Amino acid sequence: MGTDKANDISKDSIHWKTPAAAHPLAEKPGEIAANINYHAQFSPHFSPFKFQPEQAYYATAESVHDRLIQQWNETYLHFHKIDPKQTYYLSMEYLQGRALTNAIGNLNIQNAYADALNKLGHKLEEIVEQEKDAALGNGGLGRLASCFLDSMATLNLPAWGYGLRYRYGLFKQRITKEGQEEIAEDWLEKFSPWEIVRHDVVFPIRFFGHVQVNPDGLRKWVGGEIIQALAYDVPIPGYKTKNTISLRLWEAKACASDFNLFQFNDGQHESAAQLHSKAQHICAVLYPGDVTEDGKLLRLKQQFFLCSASLQDIISRFKERKEGQRQWSELPSKVAVQLNDTHPTLAIPELMRLLMDDEGLGWDEAWDITTRTIAYTNHTVLPEALEKWSQSVMKKLLPRHMEIIEEIDRRFVAMVQSTRTDLGSKLQSMRILDNNPQKPVVRMANLCVVSSHAVNGVAELHSDILKSELFADYVSIWPTRFQNKTNGITPRRWLLFCSPELSGLITKWLKTDRWVTNLDLLTDLRKFADNGDFQAAWASAKMANKQRLAKYILQVTGVNIDPNSLFDIQVKRIHEYKRQLLNIIGVVYRYKKLKEMSPEERKKTTPRTVMIGGKAFATYTNAKRIVKLVNDVGAVVNNDPEVNSYLKVVFVPNYNVSVAEMLIPGSELSQHISTAGMEASGTSNMKFALNGCLIIGTLDGANVEIREEIGQENFFLFGAKADEVPRLRKERENGLFKPDPRFEDAKQFIRSGAFGSYDYNPLLESLEGNTGYGRGDYFLVGYDFPSYLEAQARVDGAYKDKKRWLKMSILSTAGSGKFSSDRTIAQYAKEIWNIKDCPVP
C-alpha cells in the first residue's frame, strides 16, 4: 500500500515539474506533455495537485481533442465552401468504443503521445484503460454504424452521423449466482471529454397536440408539448487525413420558461418540473421496455426526436450553404439520408411535413423530393424485429404524421390497383397500414420500401432473401430499387490498433502499411502461408494476444485459463436464433464424454477453453436462462480436477467494444452458428476472420461470402441450408423429426442437476414437442446438433496439426480484404448516395 502511495506522489511531482503551456496542435512529445499539463491545470475537472491515471486520462483526451476541434472546424468550413452533396446517416445506435486509442492512431501521433505520457510519469496503455466505452449502442447494428463513420472520414466523404445521447445506455451487465443483472451504464457519470456541446444548435420537437386546418386548406400541427433538442458533436477523424467529420448526438431538454415557479412554491414540486422530467426520459435509456403504453410512447418519442431534430438540422444546413433563395428541387442533389434499419422511418413523414406545412410545397413536389433523398437499409428478416407501431399510439403522439402515412398508403394502394391488377390478392400484406380491427398497426418496413429510392440488404444471402421472399412483391413493381451492400469493418480499430503484434508482422512481410486503407493487399500474405519463419512469427503474435486475453479473463472472472489450449469464442447478443444454446449443449456433451474417459484417453483430446459473452435483453427470459446455464456449467467444469485441464467454460461479462478488442485478437476458433437464413450478415465474423481466427459456422449471413473468400477448406461448415429450413420446420410439425441420442443425453445431463438445482425445464422444453408457442425447436438446434459435433471433431483434429492450423489462420486473414467497411462505404457512396470525396486541402 505504501509503495502505491509513494508512486502516486512521485507521479504528481513529475507532472508539476513539466511546464504547462498551450500547444493545441503539438506533435513533439515535449510540447504534447506541456499541452496535457496545460489542460490538467487550466481546464480542471478535479481538485488541484492530483495527477493520477484518471486525471491524466481526461487531460490527455482534452489535448487530443484540441487537434480534433481544429480539424473538425477546417472540414466543416471546407464542406461549407464547396457545398458538395452530403450524406446523413440516421441510426438509433452507435457503438463507438474507446476514442483515445482510435484518435491518436488515426492522427498518427500514438508514439508521440506515449512518449509525452512517459515524461509525465504515466504509461499510455494504463491511461487508455481509464476510458469508459460510450454507451450509445447494443450490438452489431451500432458497431456497423461506427465502422461506417470511420470509413466515411477516411475516404474523405462529406458525411455525418446522427444519433441520441443516451445517458444510461442499454445496461451494464453484472453476473451473479442468479444469472444476469442489469445496472445503468455510468459513462457520463463524470463527463465525456470527446463531445462538444453546441448551445446554438437547438431545435423544437413537438409531441401530441392536434392538426389545425386553416381557411386556405393548409394543415398545421399545433398544441401538445414541445421539448428542445440540443446538439453534441463527437469528432470522428479519418485515418491519416485532415478530414474530421461529426457524429451529432441529440440531448432532450426543457426551457427555464417550462418550469412553473408558482406551482413549485406552492409545494407542487413534481408537476412544476413535469416537462423537464419528461425531457430527461427521452435520452435516458436505449430501447426502454415497451410492454406498457407509456413504454411504447417513449420508444416512439425517441425515434421521432432523432428524426425531427436531424432533419431540421439538415434543412438548416442546406439553406445556410447558399446565400439567397435555394430551390427545394435541389435538395436531393445536395442531401442523402440513409435510414439504418426501421428505427428512423419517421424521417419519411417528418420530411414530408416540413416540406408541406413549414415550407409550403404541394404533395407531389414534397413526395418527389422525399423519395429521391431517402434510402433504407434492412437488417433483419425476423418478423418480430420488423417494427409495427399501433395506429392509435401513432395518432396520439404524432397526429399529423399519421395523416401523412395514411395518405402515402392511400396513394400506394391506388397506384397498385390501377397499374398492377395481378397483385390484388397481395395488396393487403403490401400496404403500409394493417387495418386488422383487433390490432391496427403501421408497418414501418413497408413504409420504408414504398418511400425510398434504394433499399439494400447487408450480405448477398440476406439481400437474395429480401428480394425472393420478404419484399418479393415490391421487387416486381420496382426491380431496380433493391441492392446488396455486404457489410464491412474498419481495419484500423479491428486489426491495426487492437493487435499491434499481428499488424506489425503483416506490415513487415508485405513491406508496406498500405493494406490499412486498401485491405485487398492482404491477399499477398497467401504466398507466405507455408513459410516456416512467417508461421513461427504468426504463432508468436497470436500467443501474445492469447496471453493478454488470459490475463484479462483472470482479472474479470477469477478463472485461470491456459494459453496453450484452443481458445474458442462466441460473443454476440444473446438470442435464440444466434444459438448460444447449441454451443453450451455441445460443451455439456463434451464434458460428459470427458468424464467417461480414462485419464490416458483424456490426454489424447484437444484441450479447449470455451468463452461465451453477450447481453440478454432485460425482458427476454429464455436468453437470460442461457446466460445462467453457461455460468452454471462453467462453475462445475472449471472446478472439476479430473477435467479442468482439458476443458474450461467462461462467461465473459459486460461484452462491449473494448472487451471485443481483447477477445477477438486472442481467439483461435469463433462460433457463428445461427440458424441459416436468420442472421442478416453478422460483422463479428469478419473481425475474427481478419485476425486469423477460424470460423465454425452455418451458411448464414456473411459466413457464405467469408467462406468463399478464405477458401472452404479453411472454414468448419455444418448445419441445414437456408432453403431447407422451411421444409425441416414442416417435418418437425408433422412429427417426423427423430432427435440424435447424443442431444437427448446432453439435455438429460442438464436435467439431472449436474449443474445445480436451477429449473432448466422451460428452456429445454423450447427444444421439444413439435408445435406450439415456445415449443418445437424453431431454430433447429436439435436438427443441427449431430453435424455441429462432427464439425467440432474436425476442429479438434485440425488443431493438433499446428502447421496446418497456422496455414489456415494465415489464409483466413489473407482472404478478409473484401470485408473492409471502406469497400462497403465506397459502394454506398457511388451506388446509393451519389456523393464524391471532398478532401480538406
Image: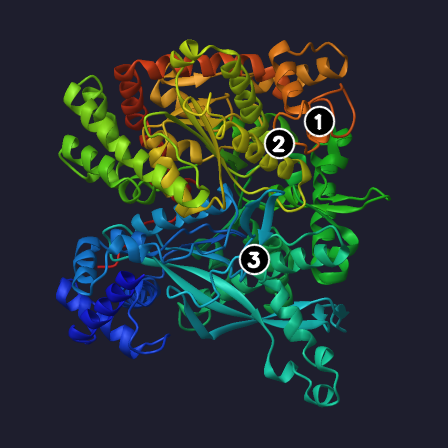
User: Quick one: SS at disc 2?
Assistant: helix
Q: Position of residue 366 (x, y in %)?
A: 60, 57
Kindly identify which residue carries mark 2: 576
User: Quick one: SS at disc 3?
Assistant: loop
- Earlier residue among tags 2 and 1: 2
Near mark 2 (Cα within 10 A), the count class, few <14, some 14-19 or many ≥20, is many
| Residue shown at 75% from the left, 37% from the top | 417
Q: Which mark is residue 591?
A: none
Position of 33 relative to 748 (above/below)? below
| Residue shown at 20% from the left, 39% from the top | 514
Distance, label 2 to label 3, CA atoms, is: 25 Å
- Earlier residue among tags 2 and 3: 3
Furthest residue toward right: 437
**Tag 2 and tag 3, C-beta contact below 8 Å:** no
Mark yes or no: residue 725 visible: no
Q: Which mark is residue 184?
A: 3
In depth, the one of 782 and 144 nearer the eye is 782
Which amino acid type is shown beneath numbered disc 1? Ser
Q: Quadrant of residue 120?
A: bottom left
